[in-house]
């Protein structure tokens, strides 16, 4: 067992107070490396959600009037406390969700950047003056917070999602109700401690732990919620979109992906190969932006497959706190079965397992498939594991066409030294994000992060969230 922590007891954080579940029920939070008990968490119910939204709504009027200086100071203080409590946050990312130490440090540093970038939003909540045809009329727009923001976050990058979405909502004057994944409640409890210590007023940030399948609708369907941000599966995302449509609740959805990488014959494979591996094997492939489809031009196809298989076979599967360890455990037995089914189905239908395909405890070896056809589940369905398929293509045009042959549209990448093809790909790929000579796995605080089609709606990021989480009001003064 990699864990260095003791079993913890986790409560909700509502209205500035730590409280147990209204029903008194709890649930187990497991360490995915061996399914040992990591924490006992309060199992939220609809009553807990209603208490949290009421607390957030009650805090709105006063919090809306806080000054940019106050919110900026609180957010910068959050970053300072995070640095002081770095070891706790990193340990949580390792022991609660199975991050390798490299991934945990990557996420911690990204989280710091998210909070500091959010602090810069506080002074950018602004409108503009507007010309008027009426003589003597002064016309302007002002931008105001929406009110209560509901945030539902996944297990895979809980610190990045928490720091970005929560900090951005608070930065522009909203209050927050947060429902974290039932597989990552402790991380959000830690952040609640940090935000409270930083000075955020009671009710500004509220956390309810529990099973999203049980209480998600209570949050997304609440008439007290003025905006919703959800990151998770496309199936759940469609359900949430329907609820939001009924209530006319604006939302941002970041959902699943089947992200393509196109590798042209002129690509520099020495630089491409480690980035390709990062695109799918980081955190055991449990990333919505992971590249589960590689299209490679035939002149370099065999070499690409051979080199990729060599990298996969050498991926470290040791202690998660060993810097040389690359492979993370798959989060739950349900998800492990999904990964197994995709690999077994591909094998049974004639695909070649070039590398991996086997398991070491709860960890799936980095797996590379060739010969994948349309009748295989893995061809079009998101696996959410360290599994990728490599397909030969005869031209750039075929590669672009096949890259776009999907209902998803999250991230994408192309490796080439041809600037014309690179820009043509960037302009014509149906994904919300495109990286030239870089991995599909990439994120920064201020970029418009998100996808199209089954991959979601709207964008996350400082500029995008500022616009999405506020609304413009037109004001005129007749002079």
Image (tube, helix red, strand yellow):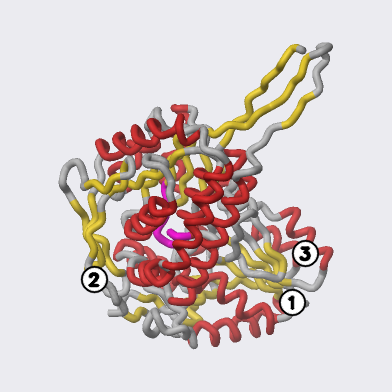
> In x, y percent, where is residue 147?
48, 33
Q: Main secondary structure of the magenta part?
A: loop
Instruction: Judge from the rendering whether residue 333 lies leftward or rightward of residue 318; answer left or right.
Output: left
Check residue 104 for magenta coloring: no
User: Reading the chain from its start, which is encountered first: label 2 or label 3?
Assistant: 2
Question: Residues at badges 2 and 3 in contact (C-beta under 8 Å)?
Answer: no
Q: Secondary structure at mark 1?
A: loop
Q: Which residue is mark 2?
A: 6
Q: Residue at x 37, y 63 (%)?
A: 338
Q: Which residue is mark 3?
A: 422
Instruction: Judge from the rendering whether residue 388 lies leftward or rightward of residue 123; answer left or right.
Output: left
User: Reading the chain from its start, which is encountered first: label 3 or label 1?
Assistant: 1
User: Reading the chain from its start, which is encountered first: label 2 or label 1?
Assistant: 2
Which mark identifies residue 267?
Answer: 1
Mark 3 is surrounded, within 10 Å at the Cα level, by few (under 14), some (14 to 19) or many (20 or more) other residues, namely: many
Above or below for 145 versus 137: below
Residues 434 and 201: in front is 201
Instruction: Judge from the rendering whether residue 416 lies leftward or rightward of residue 51; answer left or right.
Output: right
Report the Cα–Cα distance between label 2 and label 3.
50 Å
> In x, y percent, where is residue 355?
48, 82
Residues 309 and 286: in front is 286
Question: Residues at badges 2 and 1 in contact (C-beta under 8 Å)?
Answer: no
Q: Residue at x 68, y 80 (%)?
A: 271
Choose top left, top right, bottom left or bottom right for residue 358. bottom left
Stretch of the chain drawn in magenta:
152-159
Of tags 2 and 3, the one toward the viewer is 2
């Amino acid at each position: 067992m990699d864990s260095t922590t003791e079993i913890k007891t986790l409560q909700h954080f509502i209205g500035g107070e730590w409280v147990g579940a209204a029903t008194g029920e709890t649930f187990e939070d497991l360490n995915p490396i061996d399914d040992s008990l990591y924490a006992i968490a309060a199992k939220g119910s609809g009553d807990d959600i209603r208490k949290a939204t009421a607390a957030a709504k009650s805090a709105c009027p006063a919090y809306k009037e806080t000054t940019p200086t106050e919110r900026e100071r609180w957010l910068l203080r959050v970053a300072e406390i995070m640095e002081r409590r770095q070891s706790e946050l990193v340990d949580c990312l390792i022991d609660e969700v199975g991050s390798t130490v490299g991934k945990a440090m990557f996420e911690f540093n990204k989280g710091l950047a998210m909070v500091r970038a959010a602090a810069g939003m506080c002074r950018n909540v602004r409108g503009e003056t507007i010309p008027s045809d009426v003589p003597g009329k002064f016309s302007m727009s002002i931008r105001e917070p929406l009110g209560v923001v509901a945030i539902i976050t996944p297990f895979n990058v809980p610190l990045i999602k928490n720091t970005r979405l929560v900090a951005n909502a608070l930065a522009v004057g909203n209050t927050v109700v947060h429902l974290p994944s039932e597989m990552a409640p402790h991380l959000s409890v830690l952040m609640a401690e940090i935000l409270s210590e930083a000075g955020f007023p009671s009710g500004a940030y509220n956390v309810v732990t529990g099973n999203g399948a049980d209480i998600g609708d209570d949050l997304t369907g609440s008439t007290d919620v003025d905006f919703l941000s959800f990151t998770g599966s496309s199936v759940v995302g469609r359900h949430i979109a329907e609820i939001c449509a009924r209530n006319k609740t604006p939302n941002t959805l970041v959902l699943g992906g089947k992200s393509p990488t196109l590798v042209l014959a002129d690509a520099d494979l020495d630089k491409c190969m480690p980035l390709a591996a990062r695109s799918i094997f980081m955190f055991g492939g449990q990333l919505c932006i992971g590249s589960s489809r590689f299209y490679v031009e035939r002149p370099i196809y065999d070499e690409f497959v051979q080199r990729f298989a060599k990298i996969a076979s050498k991926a470290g599967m040791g202690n998660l706190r060993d810097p040389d360890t690359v492979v993370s455990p798959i989060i739950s037995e349900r998800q492990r079965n999904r990964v197994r089914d995709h690999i077994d189905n591909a094998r049974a239908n004639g695909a070649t397992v070039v590398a991996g395909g086997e398991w070491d405890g709860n960890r799936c070896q980095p797996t590379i498939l060739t010969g994948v056809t349309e009748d295989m589940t893995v061809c079009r369905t998101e696996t959410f594991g360290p599994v990728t398929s490599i397909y030969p293509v005869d031209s750039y045009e075929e590669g672009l066409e096949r890259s776009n042959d999907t209902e998803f549209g999250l991230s994408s990448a192309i490796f080439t030294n041809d600037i014309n093809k690179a820009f043509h790909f960037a302009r014509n790929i149906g994904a919300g994000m495109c990286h030239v000579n870089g991995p599909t796995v990439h994120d920064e605080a201020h970029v418009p992060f998100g996808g199209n089609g089954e991959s979601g709606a709207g964008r996350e990021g400082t500029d995008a969230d500022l616009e999405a989480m506020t609304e413009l009001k037109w004001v005129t003064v007749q002079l």
